[in-house]
Structure formats: structure tokens, C-alpha cells
């Protein structure tokens, strides 16, 4: 277990591999732990970090730190403490929202951004997220199988206020406007069967710049990295391997490896 102190409060993280840094940020259910297969895949060529956000896993629990801006500030403090000046961010759900705000605040530090089942409007979030306890959300979103067990294991640790306050701070945020101003490649990944987050409106996505692109994983729900791990990790590898400045719109679920991964 690795940890740092930010304002005398514990932030837990884990790290694998060597190379350019990639930061994995978890959603509202679970913790850093369910990122392990993706971290192992990325660590072949990159240094992969996964954090526990405030109120989750083994990081500190303080209600005044649960707003989205505070979760983004956690990421800023973490990078500063470790001396990381430029990074790739992979954010899932809540982690995606924190990544968007961090990128808005420090665009020069983000090389590229992958947002997984991340709402771009508060209306895209199922109301059950703010009403059900973490254990119930876990039963709703996660299957009882070995692939999902890492997320189920840590889901009950979440402070329910961490979910509620993040949703409250989502109200009024113009996330599409933030994406429109981004200059780095941004890949939106959505599980077609996600009951928690609605798919982004195609007409609105068409208004975004060339370097923003969405790919739907047909066999996944809210946890594509667990539901369809082989395809997700292949897509992640292709995104990380894009040449600098290249648009993610050239990425597709290529038929040759669709067949290979069936």
C-alpha cells in the first residue's frame, strides 16, 4: 500500500510499471482496485497509477472535500507531490468528472484524456445513484463473478456523502462547454448497457471538435473495463499509442480484433 499526505490527510494510491505516467480514477462504486487489469495492461509501456478519491477506499473521509472541485484538487495535489508535470488521465464516472475539471484548470498538464461512462450533464445520471446506499449500488451495477469482485470488495467502504455531494456539485456545470475548449485528444467510452449513465446525445457530440470522439462498447455496462476487459484494454492501448496530435476519431473497434476477442 502506498500513500501520501495532503493537508495531513491520507490519499491512497498504487502504481505499476515504468514510463510516461497514466492516472486511473475510479467511479462512484468501488475504488482503485478494479483498475488493476487495465493498469497491468498499460504498465507494459507506461507507469500506471490508480488513486482512491476522497471518501473512497483507503483515502480520508471528510465531507467538505467531496465536491467535484475538491476531488480535482486531490489530483492536482497528488501530481505536485510526486513531481509529475504531464500525464494521461483515464477517468470513470466520478473520476471522469474530476479529470475534466482538472484538465480545465491545468490544460498544459494533460496529454490526452479518456472518459469512461462519464456524464456530461446531471440529467444523464440515474436518480438511484443519489438515493441508494453503496452496497445496494454495488448489487445493481456489478455481477457476482471474479471479474467484478474487486469493485464489489471496496464498494461498501464509500462514504454515501461522497456520492451525494459530488452529484450536488454537478448541477450547473457546463461540461460540454469545457470539452469544446479542450485542445488535447479526448476519447469518450460508453457501455451500451450502462443503467447508471445515459449515452451522450449524438447531435451534441457532433458539435464537439475533431479531437473528441465517442466509442460504444456493446457488451458492457457501467464497468467496461470489467464487463469487456479484453476490448477495453485493446482500445486503451490504441488510444495511448496515438501519435501526438492525432485525432482519436481514427480509433475504431476493428473487425479483425473484434473477431479475435470473441
Image: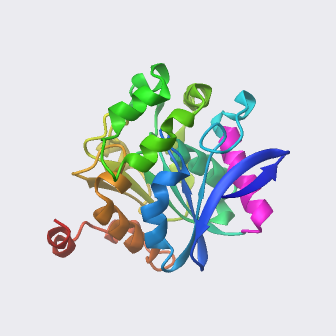
- Disc tally is 0
The quarter of the picture where the C terminus appears is bottom left
Q: Which residue lies furthest to the right in this view?
A: 8
Q: In this view, does 87 lie above or below 151?
A: below
Q: What residue lies at 80% left-to-right and 49% top-to-bottom? A: 6
Q: What residue lies at 66% left-to-right and 33% top-to-bottom? A: 67
Is residue 241 or residue 58 the one in the foreground? 58
Segment colored magenta: 69-84
Q: Confirm whether the magenta stretch covers residue 70.
A: yes
Q: Quadrant of residue 62?
A: top right
Point out residue 164 in the picture as x, y percentages from the top left corner. 57, 25
Q: In this view, does 169 lie above or below 60?
A: above
Q: Confirm whether the magenta stretch covers residue 17.
A: no
Q: In this view, does 136 lie above or below 248?
A: above
Q: In this view, does 193 lie above or below 179?
A: above
Point out residue 244 in the picture as x, y percentages from the top left corner. 51, 78
The quarter of the picture where the N terminus appears is bottom right
Is residue 224 or residue 146 the one in the foreground? 146
Left/right placement of residue 256 relative to residue 74 reads: left
Work out whether residue 28 can be spotted.
no
Q: What residue lies at 22% left-to-right and 51% top-to-bottom? A: 219
Amino acid at each position: 500500500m502506498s500513500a501520501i499526505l495532503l493537508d495531513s490527510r491520507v490519499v491512497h494510491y498504487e502504481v505499476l510499471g515504468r514510463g510516461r505516467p497514466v492516472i486511473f480514477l475510479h467511479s462512484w462504486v468501488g475504488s482503485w482496485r478494479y483498475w488493476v487489469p487495465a493498469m497491468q495492461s498499460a504498465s507494459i509501456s507506461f507507469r500506471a497509477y490508480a488513486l482512491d478519491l476522497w471518501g473512497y477506499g483507503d483515502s480520508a473521509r471528510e465531507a467538505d472535500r467531496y465536491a467535484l472541485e475538491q476531488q480535482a484538487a486531490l489530483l492536482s495535489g497528488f501530481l505536485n507531490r510526486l513531481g509529475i508535470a504531464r500525464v494521461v488521465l483515464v477517468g470513470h464516472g466520478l473520476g471522469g468528472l474530476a479529470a475534466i475539471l482538472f484538465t480545465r484548470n491545468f490544460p498544459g498538464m494533460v496529454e490526452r484524456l479518456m472518459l469512461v461512462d462519464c456524464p456530461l450533464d446531471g440529467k444523464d445520471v440515474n436518480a438511484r445513484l443519489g438515493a441508494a446506499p453503496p452496497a445496494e449500488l454495488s448489487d445493481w451495477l456489478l455481477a457476482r463473478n471474479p471479474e467484478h469482485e474487486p469493485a464489489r470488495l471496496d464498494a461498501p467502504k464509500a462514504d454515501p456523502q461522497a456520492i451525494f455531494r459530488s452529484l450536488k456539485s454537478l448541477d450547473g456545470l457546463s461540461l460540454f462547454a469545457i470539452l469544446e475548449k479542450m485542445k488535447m485528444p479526448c476519447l469518450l467510452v460508453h457501455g451500451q448497457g450502462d443503467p447508471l449513465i445515459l449515452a451522450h446525445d449524438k447531435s451534441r457530440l457532433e458539435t464537439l471538435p475533431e479531437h473528441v470522439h465517442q466509442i460504444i462498447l456493446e457488451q458492457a455496462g457501467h464497468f467496461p473495463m470489467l464487463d469487456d476487459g479484453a476490448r477495453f484494454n485493446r482500445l486503451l492501448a490504441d488510444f495511448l499509442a496515438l501519435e501526438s496530435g492525432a485525432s482519436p476519431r481514427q480509433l475504431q473497434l476493428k473487425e479483425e480484433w473484434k473477431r479475435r476477442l470473441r
